[in-house]
Image: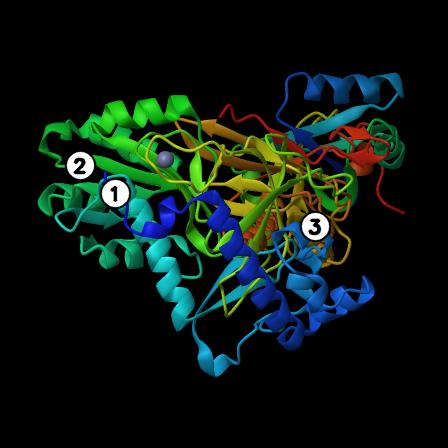
Amino acid sequence: MIVEQISVFVENKEGRLLEIAELLASNNIDISALSLADTDEYGVLRMIVSDPYKAKDALLAQGIIGKVTDVLAVSISDEPGGFAASLKRITENGISIKYMYACVSHQKGKALMILSVSDLEKAEEIVSSNKDDVAPTEIYRLEGKK
Amino acid sequence: MPVRDKIETMPRQELKKLQSERLVWQVKRMYERVECFKTRMDEKGLKPEDIKGVEDLHKLPFAYKKDLRDYYPYGLFAEPLTNIKRVHASSGTTGKRIVVGYTENDLEMWANCVARMLEGIGITKDDIFQVAFGYGFFTGGFGLHAGAEKIGATVIPISSGNTALQIQTMIDFKATAICCTPSYAMYLAEEIEKAGVKDQLSLRVGVFGAEPWSESMRKEVENKLGIKAYDIYGLSEILGPGVACECEYQCGMHVWEDNFIVEIIDPETLEVLPEGSTGELVFTTITKEGFPVIRYRTRDICSLEYAPCKCGRTHLRMNKPSGRSDDMLIIRGVNVFPSQIEEVLINIGEGKITPNYLIKVDRVNNNDTFDLEVEMSEDLFADDLKTIALTEKEISEKLRSALGLGVKVHLVNPKSIARSEGKAKRVLDLRKI
Ligand SMILES: [Zn+2]
């Protein structure tokens, strides 16, 4: 299913990540997944949080730029080959993956991945039509986009 | 050392008389030929006959940078293009260059100015002169080239850059004299030291200018290259290199007063300041035909020395400029105006970038570093590094083509650039010169 992710511009300066984490905590925003991509100069922190718009406003108030975008959440069997099978289904259909990262899963035997893909709608169709895929709504705090 | 032209030692009284005659001639022909100058004169209610000599100079209108831009490219020329033998150009406050033109007489006068300078520091026809100033729009290369040829030296027109080739050429061609920017001279000196080839050099003298440098840099270049280093001053709006230069006594730069009249003004009130004051240097070209200027404000802050020089020359000496009266920066010899950067940023993606930026200039290992902090905005930001890197690259490339200079762009958090009175502090120049 499609979920909303918040990505944040992080200057590579000491204390920046802590500042962001504390800001979210003080606004009661819960983080389910995150990944950081960075260069020497700056990074992009991507997160799945309980309220991305609230997070964006809270960060902006402190001069930190955030952007909310749609990404794909895919649940996969937590067993050898489970991840490969899911990836294959997506890429076989000519969809390329820009980046991905793992998300907290509270369902036993299932893992949850967050993917940014070239064709979001098509990817979602593929994933949702597969019987192996569990609706991520069953997973901790993650609510599908209305 | 020999004095090339008798006029260099002309008594000041006579020199003043000559300047007056030439000023009257110049004002009259410019009034007839340069529309912009006529307009400025008319605005002041001045007629050419109101100018009877140097004592009336202060009445004349200043040449404005804005005029140089508005009359781009040829509008300020006082000769038809058929009489213009060459043009050069320098960067102006906006993207537009300031174009200057030279007649045959101008080129001759220019070469003579440079030749006087070179002879004054003991360069002769027996010298092998490596011209490591850039050739092109920049006046440095062609200017020194012509002067060195004039005195009959053997000229190596290598132009700027390619350090390995510079050093190899210096060794193989047995160069005895060199000219380039002082920071490049420092760089060359270090590379020569690293390569351990100092004892293979035949260099004995260097002529450096086109950017600010210090006495300690001079000492270092002199020691590392085993040469005597001389300072020159020039700007293309006036002529190019050779407007002023040191003699063997290195006590300020002689301004060739038979071609130029200089004044020192208060940059705020625009009043002419008394002898010996420090203020903004203003030039009037009294012999130049193609692109003459009356009261051109250089924005360089310095003082003038009128006392006779030990070398016997009577032409006054200007001290090394101590700063600028505007926000222009000279980075690696290139003029950079913050307004140029602003224009580039504003034009990228139609307002995607807030024009809040910070120019950071420093000098590391005697080379200027040029960094630009640009505030990240929501429109610029993307969730992947590749897109951000592309944006950064776009900014860098547009700046490079606008400024003619490489700049390292850094994206920073919004509102992280300090502001005073709502305006961001634009320049942080950490160079200790
Ligand atoms: Zn002298």
Residue with the mark numbered 3 = B58
Q: Position of residue B356 (x, y in %)?
A: 74, 40
Q: Is residue B9 left or right of residue B36?
A: left
**Dot 3 falls on which chain?**
B
Distance Cα–Cα, label 3 vs label 1:
39 Å
- Are the residues under marks 2 and 3 on the same chain? yes
Q: Is residue B353 visible?
A: yes
Say whether marks 1 and 2 touch (CB < 8 Å). Answer: yes
- Whichever of callouts 2 and 3 sits on the residue coming sooner in the sequence is 3
Residue found 67% across the figure and 57% down from its top: B63
Residue with the mark numbered 2 = B203
Distance Cα–Cα, label 1 vs label 2:
8 Å
In the image, B165 versus B4, the foreground residue is B4
Q: Disc 2 on helix, strand or loop?
A: loop
Residue found 89% across the figure and 20% down from its top: A28
Q: Is residue B428 left or right of residue B144?
A: right
The correct choice, above or below, for A146 with respect to A92 in the image is above
Residue with the mark numbered 1 = B178
For ligand 1, give the image quadrant.
Answer: top left
Which one is in front in this view, the residue at disc 3 or the one at disc 1?
A: 3
Q: Looking at the picture, which amino acid does disc 2 mark?
A: Leu
Q: Position of residue B172 (x, y in %)?
A: 9, 45
The correct choice, above or below, for B221 with respect to B338 in the image is above
